[in-house]
Image (cartoon, rainbow, N blue to C red):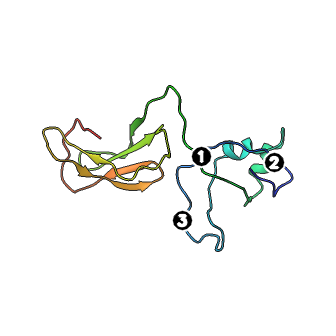
């Protein structure tokens, strides 16, 4: 909910946040979110979305809530930069607290799981310098 701009509706809305901005951009602030135009527009008074989107840094009150995607299963989207030696996936629609602590990849014919590195937001990558063998299990 925002209230620091005249275009703010003052009404709470729920938006999906997948990543915080790099630390210490705004010293003394507990968090800094780079929000989409859609998310900012949802917090605006009717007809004032563009004014709020162009408002620069806007203070918001926030609290964490569980993710709810009724009827939708978790999805894994392969990033377009993936290749035989590098695999990156976008993980979406995880219900619950939304925090993935770890993701691992198992290659075709393997019995072991290879830990993936958290890239940013909901993106996870595997880059061990060796050719990867699909299909994969995550």
Check disc 1: other Cα within 10 Å, few if <14, some if 14-19, many if 20+: few
Give the residue pinned by disc 2.
10
The single residue placed furthest to the bottom in the displayed view is 27
Q: Is residue 127 above or below residue 75?
A: below
Where in the figure is residue 10, as x and y percent of width and height?
81, 48
Who comes first in sequence, dot 1 or dot 3? 3
| Of labels 3 and 2, the one closer to you | 2
Considering depth in this image, is 9 or 38 the residue closer to the camera? Answer: 9
Q: Quadrant of residue 4?
A: bottom right
Q: Is residue 20 above or below residue 36?
A: below
- Per the rendering, the mark at residue 22 is 3
Who comes first in sequence, dot 3 or dot 2? 2
Q: Is residue 113 left or right of residue 4?
A: left
**How far apart are the alpha carbons under marks 1 and 3?**
22 Å
| Of labels 1 and 3, the one closer to you | 1
Q: Secondary structure at mark 2?
A: loop
Check disc 3: other Cα within 10 Å, few if <14, some if 14-19, many if 20+: few
Where in the figure is residue 125, as x and y percent of width and height?
34, 51
Q: Is residue 63 above or below residue 136?
A: below
What residue lies at 59% left-to-right and 46% top-to-bottom? Answer: 65
């Amino acid at each position: 909910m925002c209230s620091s701009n005249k275009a703010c509706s003052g009404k709470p809305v729920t938006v999906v946040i997948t990543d915080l901005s790099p630390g210490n951009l705004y010293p003394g602030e507990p968090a800094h979110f780079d929000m989409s135009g859609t998310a900012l527009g949802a917090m605006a008074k009717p007809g004032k979305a563009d004014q709020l989107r162009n408002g620069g840094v806007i203070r918001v009150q926030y609290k964490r809530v569980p993710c709810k995607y009724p009827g939708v299963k978790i999805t894994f989207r392969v990033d377009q930069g993936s290749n035989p030696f590098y695999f990156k996936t976008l993980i979406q629609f995880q219900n619950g607290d939304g925090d993935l602590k770890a993701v691992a990849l198992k290659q075709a014919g393997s019995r072991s799981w290879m830990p993936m590195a958290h890239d940013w937001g909901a993106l996870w990558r595997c880059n061990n310098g060796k050719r990867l063998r699909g299909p994969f299990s995550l």
